[in-house]
Image (cartoon, rainbow, N blue to C red):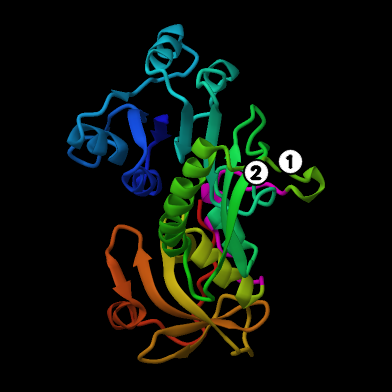
């Protein structure tokens, strides 16, 4: 089986590395970009792997260009594998491989179709998620299901941690699925459209903490919006990101008020219950424990963290 692999991030790189017994004849990834204060040229993890193994690596700005379509055809692939690539495959590209295109998606489809399934599962307080490998269709994440594997979501697990764990599960499931496809030992199961839910792109606005919400929902917001945009509030006009916290039963003050201070951190009253803040990042500062933040900024009981952020 000749495979062309599409991907751009660490999740995709984990899957590509696992394809040891599958013949990958080329990779497609995002163009190089300049990042950071020094504007250094940054290569995607997929390109780094391709260079290490002397693989063909295409980096098109658009999949609609006829030259890109012809380059993909020249690789004579049996199947395209797409994992966290970041671009929608056109119908012309979907039709190139001899068999079809498959996608590794971070949810139990048809739930959480879209760009951020891991984040939305945590935001909604799900206890279970999983990995789906689907035959790709032009409609977003609506293709027939080939295989699925469920996973529990830990009560303290962040979207970063869950996605890393999901990459390990998904990469192994991908290899087994490709072997089954190669041997003809697979079947396609249409998705139930009535069960479909969306997982759209995250926005910065989603990170604003409304302390009037229940503590459990804010806790899920903190866990689910890592690393970006993060869950944030305001302290003396500066953005304060809450990086680590846990729900607490404390009540007795207006939402957003500090109701307790200890060596562990500080507790903020919410609409229902409270939230014990353990780690923070103040704008233009560094990541620090809540205890160190308390020592440096002298927070007091009753002080509020609910000013708006623009």
Q: Image height check: is 126 above or below 63? A: below
Magenta stretch: includes residue 206: yes
Q: Which mark, by number, is residue 145?
A: 2
Q: Which of the pair 272/26 is nearer the observer?
A: 26
Residue 206 seen in this snapshot: no
Task: Return the disc, 2 or 1, that comes first in the chain's sequence.
Answer: 2
Q: Which mark is residue 190?
A: 1
Q: Is residue 81 visible?
A: yes
C-alpha distance separating marks 2 and 1: 6 Å
**For the residues bearing labels 2 and 1, Cβ distance under 8 angstroms:** yes
Residue 119 part of the magenta-drawn span: no
Determine the secondary structure under disc 2.
strand
Residue depicted at x 60% and y 33%: 136
Indicate the position of residue 243 as horizontal and vertical percent values: 41, 68
Q: Nearer the viewer, residue 94 or 8?
A: 94
Look at the magenta stretch and give its main secondary structure.
Answer: loop
Left or right: where does residue 226 sit relative to residue 186? Answer: left
Crowding near the residue tagged with mark 1, few <14, some 14–19, many ≥20 C-alpha atoms within 10 Å: some
Q: Residue at x 40, y 92 (%)?
A: 262
Q: Which residues are magenta?
A: 197-213
Where is 201 relative to 252, above or below?
Answer: above
Q: Is residue 89 left or right of residue 5?
A: right
Question: The N terminus is located in which quarter?
Answer: top left
x and y, in percent, of residue 223 in the image = 50, 66
Residue 240 numbered tag:
none
Q: Is residue 126 left or right of residue 170?
A: right
Judged from the image, the secondary structure of the residue bearing numbered disc 1 is: loop
Q: Residue at x 34, y 33 (%)?
A: 23
């Amino acid at each position: 089986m000749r495979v062309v692999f599409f991907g751009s991030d660490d999740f995709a790189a984990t899957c590509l590395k696992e394809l040891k017994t599958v013949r990958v004849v080329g990779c497609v990834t995002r163009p190089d970009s300049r990042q950071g204060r020094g504007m250094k040229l940054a290569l995607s993890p997929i390109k780094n792997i391709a260079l290490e193994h002397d693989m063909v690596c295409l980096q098109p700005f658009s999949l609609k260009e006829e030259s890109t379509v012809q380059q993909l055809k020249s690789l004579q692939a049996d199947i395209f594998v797409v994992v966290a690539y970041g671009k929608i495959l056109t119908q012309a590209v979907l039709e190139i491989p001899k068999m079809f295109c498959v996608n590794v998606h971070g949810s139990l489809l048809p739930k959480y179709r879209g760009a951020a399934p891991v984040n939305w599962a945590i935001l909604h307080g799900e206890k279970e998620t999983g990995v789906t490998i689907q035959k790709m269709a032009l409609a977003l994440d609506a293709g027939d299901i080939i295989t699925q594997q469920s996973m529990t979501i830990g009560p303290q697990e962040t979207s970063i941690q869950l996605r890393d764990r999901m990459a390990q599960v998904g990469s192994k499931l991908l290899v087994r699925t490709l072997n089954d496809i190669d041997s003809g030992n697979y079947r396609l199961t249409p998705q139930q459209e009535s069960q479909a839910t969306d997982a759209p792109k995250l926005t910065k606005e989603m990170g604003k903490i409304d302390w009037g919400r229940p503590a459990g929902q804010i806790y899920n917001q903190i866990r689910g919006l890592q690393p970006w945009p993060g869950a944030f509030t305001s302290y003396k006009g500066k953005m304060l990101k809450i990086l680590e916290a846990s729900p607490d039963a404390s009540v007795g003050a207006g939402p957003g008020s500090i109701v307790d201070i200890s060596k562990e951190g500080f507790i903020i009253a919410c609409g229902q219950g409270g939230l014990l803040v353990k780690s923070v990042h103040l704008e233009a500062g560094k990541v620090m424990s809540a205890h160190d933040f308390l020592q440096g900024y002298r927070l007091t009981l009753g002080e509020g963290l609910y000013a708006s952020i623009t």
